[in-house]
């Protein structure tokens, strides 16, 4: 499969964007910056648009999703947009009952735990992805030369919501299932990987210039569990968008012990959370992989001087990697002051970059 001629990477509008240069390990004018969860709750213009519309209904309204996607680019001048959606959207589009409960997160009508539950999982019909394709088309057209990042959840993280029935601190039922019944586990993750890969590919074909795979809860696994139970399915999702020219970013929290295995799953860029320094991550990865991250989101609640000092450390550490894109170590907290985020972007862009190309 090749991308359509009007795709921003093919027509060339985003081809030389700083974000994509850094993801490819090339020299850039300034260090690119965007924030995970930059769309959404921290923005008053988002909260105003969302009044009276549920989270998933907003994701499935192409005009609304495109508008929310573009809001942080207009406000902060970030170097990328990330498509406004959720890791549970493909599961919903396949027909499962899932809601995003305000203040809680994704909640399933019925958890998926038994062989009968897994057998009954419906296949995602290609036409069900039409709202995603339309939303991405609209967003990419509006964004012009700012690249749009498509994303999905990694099979392990999405499966943990399916098995637990909602957010979980310890993922106990999920870990019990993967240890007790590997056959059932792989059948479940095979379905999640297929469903999620279709959602990701739809975003790429419709105009995303890069992708990010979020394995947010990967830190719950031991290295042995990761390699046996999660990595093959993440590899399948990343392989589904290989060879299209879109850089593939892979992110997890508490992921230090998994960084190399996550890269080996087929990532071009590793997202690093705040619990691992970029210098440490670069060392672990043999200095061979561009990095993204990793300012501690907790610092957004503190003083500006401390935040600016932490940003300078992140910039210094990132200079050693073949490429570096500034981001937070996890998502923007809902109570973050948007003004602080804009100020961070301005500071990153004001510093000349002397990153060497490799
Ligand atoms: O900038 C953006 O907001 C982009 C859109 C986006 C993304 C990339 C949303 C919208 N969700 C996600 C990914 C996502 N969703 C992840 C991976 C990233 C991460 O770890 O933060 C995860 C784990 C989810 C699941 C989810 N959805 C949670 C976490 C619950 C938990 O287990 O702690 C929550 C709270 C949601 C709801 C949600 N998704 C997105 C928004 C803006 C919201 C808040 C709901 C609202 O505004 O009503």
Image (tube, rainbow, N blue to C red):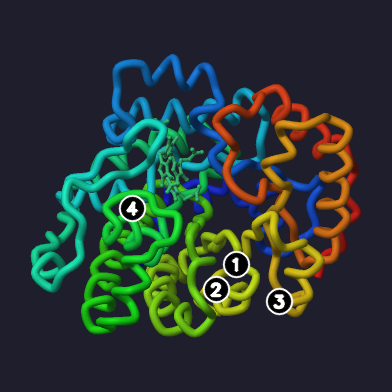
Q: How many circles with numbers are drawn on the protein? A: 4
13 left or right, relative to 348? left
Q: Earlier in the sequence, mark 3 or mark 1?
A: 1
Quadrant in which the N terminus is drawn: bottom left
**In the image shown, does 172 or 263 lie closer to the viewer?**
172
- Secondary structure, mark 3, is loop
Q: Earlier in the sequence, mark 2 or mark 3?
A: 2
From the top left corner, tell me how far across and down residue 263 is, in percent.
58, 74
- Labelled pair 2, 1 in contact (Cβ < 8 Å): yes
- Labelled pair 4, 3 in contact (Cβ < 8 Å): no
Camera sees residue 210: yes
Confirm if mark 4 falls within 8 A of ligand 1.
no
Mark 4 burial class by Cα count in 10 Å: few <14, some 14-19, many 20+: many
As measured in the structure, the alpha-carbon distance from the residue carrying label 2 to the one carrying label 1 is 9 Å
From the top left corner, tell me how far across and down residue 95 is, in percent.
15, 49
228 left or right, relative to 280? left
The residue positioned 84% from the left and 59% from the top of the image is 317
Nearer the viewer's eye, disc 4 or disc 3?
3
Residue 202 — which label? 4
- Which residue is tagged 1? 255
Camera sees residue 2: no
Nearer the viewer's eye, disc 3 or disc 1?
1
From the top left corner, tell me how far across and down residue 208 is, in percent.
46, 49
Mark 1 burial class by Cα count in 10 Å: few <14, some 14-19, many 20+: many
- Which residue is tagged 2? 262
- Which residue is tagged 3? 285
């Amino acid at each position: 499969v090749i991308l359509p001629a009007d795709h921003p990477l093919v027509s060339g509008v985003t081809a030389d964007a700083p974000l994509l240069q850094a993801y490819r390990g090339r020299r850039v004018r300034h260090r690119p910056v965007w924030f995970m969860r930059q769309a959404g709750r921290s923005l008053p213009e988002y909260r105003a648009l969302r009044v009276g519309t549920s989270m998933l209904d907003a994701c499935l309204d192409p005009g609304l999703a495109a508008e929310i996607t573009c809001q942080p680019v207009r406000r902060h001048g970030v170097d990328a947009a990330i498509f406004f959606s959720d890791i549970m959207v493909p599961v919903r589009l396949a027909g499962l009952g899932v809601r995003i409960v305000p203040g809680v997160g994704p909640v399933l009508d019925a958890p998926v735990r038994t062989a009968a539950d897994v057998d009954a999982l419906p296949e995602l019909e290609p036409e069900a992805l039409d709202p995603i394709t339309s939303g991405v088309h609209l967003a990419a057209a509006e964004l012009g030369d700012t690249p749009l990042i498509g994303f999905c959840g990694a099979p392990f993280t999405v499966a943990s919501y399916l098995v637990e029935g909602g957010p979980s601190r310890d993922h106990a039922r999920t870990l019990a299932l993967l240890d007790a019944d590997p056959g059932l586990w792989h059948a479940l993750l095979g379905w999640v990987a297929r469903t999620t890969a279709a959602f990701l590919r739809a975003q790429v074909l419709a105009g995303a210039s890069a992708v990010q795979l979020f394995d947010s809860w990967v830190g719950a696994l031991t290295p042995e569990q990761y390699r046996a139970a999660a990595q093959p399915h993440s590899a399948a999702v990343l392989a589904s968008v290989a060879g299209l020219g879109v850089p593939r970013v892979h992110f997890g929290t508490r992921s230090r012990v998994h960084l190399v295995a996550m890269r080996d799953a087929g990532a071009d860029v590793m997202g690093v959370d705040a619990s691992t320094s970029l210098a440490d991550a670069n060392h672990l990865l043999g200095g061979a992989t561009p990095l993204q991250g990793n300012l501690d989101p907790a610092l957004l609640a503190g003083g500006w001087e401390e935040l600016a000092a932490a940003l300078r450390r992140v910039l210094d550490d990132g200079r050693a990697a073949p490429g570096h894109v500034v981001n937070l170590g996890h998502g923007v907290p809902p109570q973050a002051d948007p003004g602080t985020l804009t100020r961070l972007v301005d500071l990153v862009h004001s510093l000349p970059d002397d990153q060497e190309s490799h």
